[in-house]
C-alpha cells in the first residue's frame, strides 16, 4: 500500500480523534446500547437501533483511522522551502476575474478541510498549482467554466 503524506499537525489531529473514538465514544455507545436493551423488546426499540447504528459508524471510522495512521508519512513542513508550490506549501492566490484572494495550505487527503484553509494535494486546484511559483497563473476547470488564478505568495511555515 502507498504511504499517505500528511503534516505533523494533521497526524496529531487524527491521532487525537482516534484516541477519543476508542476511549470515550466506544464507552458512551456501549452504555447507550445497554440502556436501550434494558427497555425490553429489541425489535421495536428505536434507541437500540440508533445506538447500534452509532456503534457501526464509530467502529468504521476507527478502522479507517487505524489504516490512515499506519500508512502515514509525516512531512515536516517547516523543513521545506522553495519558491514553487509543493506539498506543505501555504499559497496565497487571487481569482483573476473577481480579484478575491484566498490562502490555502496544500496537505494530505485525510487532513484536508477547505473551510479551515487546508486543501488536499489531490484536489483539482492543488494539482493545478503544483510546480508553479509566485506571479504565475494557473487554470482550474470548474462546474461553471474554467477559472484563472494568479499565485501571489508561496510560503513554508
Image (spheres, grey):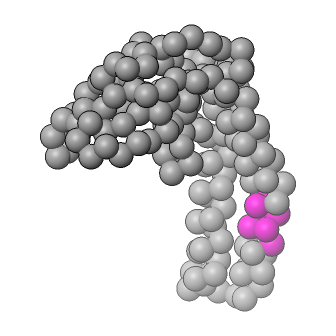
**Looking at the image, is 56 positioned above or below residue 123?**
below
Give percent across and percent down for residue 136: 34, 19
The residue at the far left in this view is: 145
Give percent across and percent down for residue 52: 63, 67
Front in this rendered view, residue 129 or 6: 129
Name the image quarter holding the C terminus: top right
Relative side of 89 to 129, left or right? right
Question: How many marks on residues?
Answer: 0
Front in this rendered view, residue 119 or 56: 119
Rendered image quadrant of residue 54 = bottom right
Q: Is residue 137 visible?
A: yes
Front in this rendered view, residue 150 or 108: 150
Name the image quarter holding the N terminus: top right
Chain part drawn in magenta: 25-31
Give percent across and percent down for residue 11: 71, 33
| Residue at image point 67% right, 36% down | 10
Magenta-colored segment: predominant secondary structure: helix
| Residue at image point 71% right, 14% down | 79
**Looking at the image, is 30 positioned above or below residue 69?**
below
| Residue at image point 25% right, 27% down | 139
Say if the magenta span includes residue 27. yes
Relative side of 82 to 70, left or right? left
Say if the magenta span includes residue 82. no
Rendered image quadrant of residue 31 = bottom right
Q: Is residue 112 visible?
A: no
Relative side of 105 to 6, left or right? left
**Looking at the image, is 34 positioned above or below residue 52?**
below
Front in this rendered view, residue 46 or 20: 20
Rendered image quadrant of residue 148 = top left
Give percent across and percent down for residue 156: 62, 22
Amino acid at each position: 500500500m502507498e504511504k499517505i503524506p500528511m503534516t505533523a499537525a494533521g497526524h496529531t489531529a487524527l491521532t487525537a480523534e482516534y484516541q477519543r473514538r476508542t476511549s470515550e465514544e466506544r464507552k458512551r455507545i456501549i452504555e447507550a446500547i445497554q440502556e436501550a436493551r434494558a427497555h425490553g423488546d429489541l425489535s421495536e426499540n428505536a434507541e437500540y437501533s440508533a445506538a447500534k447504528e452509532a456503534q457501526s459508524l464509530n467502529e468504521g471510522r476507527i478502522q479507517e483511522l487505524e489504516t490512515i495512521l499506519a500508512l502515514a508519512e509525516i512531512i515536516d513542513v517547516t523543513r521545506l522551502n522553495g519558491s514553487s508550490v509543493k506539498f506543505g506549501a501555504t499559497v496565497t492566490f487571487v481569482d483573476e476575474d473577481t480579484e478575491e484572494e484566498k490562502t490555502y495550505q496544500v496537505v494530505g487527503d485525510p487532513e484536508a478541510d477547505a473551510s479551515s484553509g487546508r486543501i488536499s494535494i489531490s484536489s483539482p486546484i492543488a494539482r493545478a498549482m503544483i510546480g508553479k511559483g509566485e506571479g504565475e497563473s494557473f487554470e482550474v476547470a470548474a462546474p461553471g467554466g474554467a477559472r484563472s488564478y494568479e499565485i501571489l505568495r508561496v510560503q513554508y511555515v
